[in-house]
Amino acid sequence: MDIFRPPQLKGLLSHAKSVRNGVYRGTVTGKQGHQISGGEITGTFDYRLSTASTGLPTRLHTTVKSVLSGMLQHTDTRYSAWGHSVTITEPPEHEVAAMDEFPDSSSEELQEYLEIADDTVASIRR
């Protein structure tokens, strides 16, 4: 789940079964996941999305049960320092790839990331 993509974030918020103290909890079915992710997510998963008082995400915990093995996969992602300055150091030339080396869908995905507003969650909740 990529909360930096507004449709996926909106999908999580809309499928929350409970919201308490800025924590959204719910389950997304395979069909719902397929819809909100544009086909990238096909399995059912449980989630817990925590937000700060500003509405910005602070943590996303997902649990997926493997259909084949029955094993659980937990993913715990934390988000912090929203709005703070960052320093990005240019990588060495040998670690850089040109955009034309990637499939067309990669450039569309990059454009989505470039268009994300700082207050996505806050504006979605309004």
Image: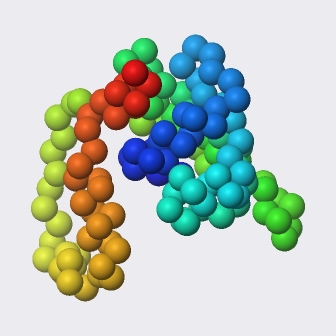
Residue for point 56% across, 40% down:
12
62, 41: nearer the viewer? 41
Rendering coords of residue 111 (x, y %): 24, 60
Where 44 sits versus 123, above or below? below
Residue 109 to residue 16: above or below: below
The residue at 68%/47% (across/down) is 28
Which residue sits at x=59%, y=24%? 23
Q: Is residue 51 left or right of residue 66?
A: left
The answer to whether residue 56 of the structure is visible from this angle is no
Q: Number of numbered discs present? A: 0
Instruction: Answer with the quarter of the image where residue 125 lies.
Output: top left
Up the image or down, 58 lies above or below 77; here it is: above
- Identify the residue at the far bottom of this view: 101
- Give the percent coordinates (x, y) of residue 77: 52, 43
From the top left corner, tell me how far across and down residue 2 is, in percent.
47, 51
Instruction: Tell me where residue 78 appears, x and y as whole percent.
Output: 48, 38
Instruction: Please state if 84 lies on the left or on the right of 49 as rendered.
Output: left
Q: Is residue 2 above or below residue 101?
A: above
Scheme by which the image is coloured: rainbow
Q: Is residue 75 visible?
A: yes
| Quarter of the rendering containing residue 92 | bottom left
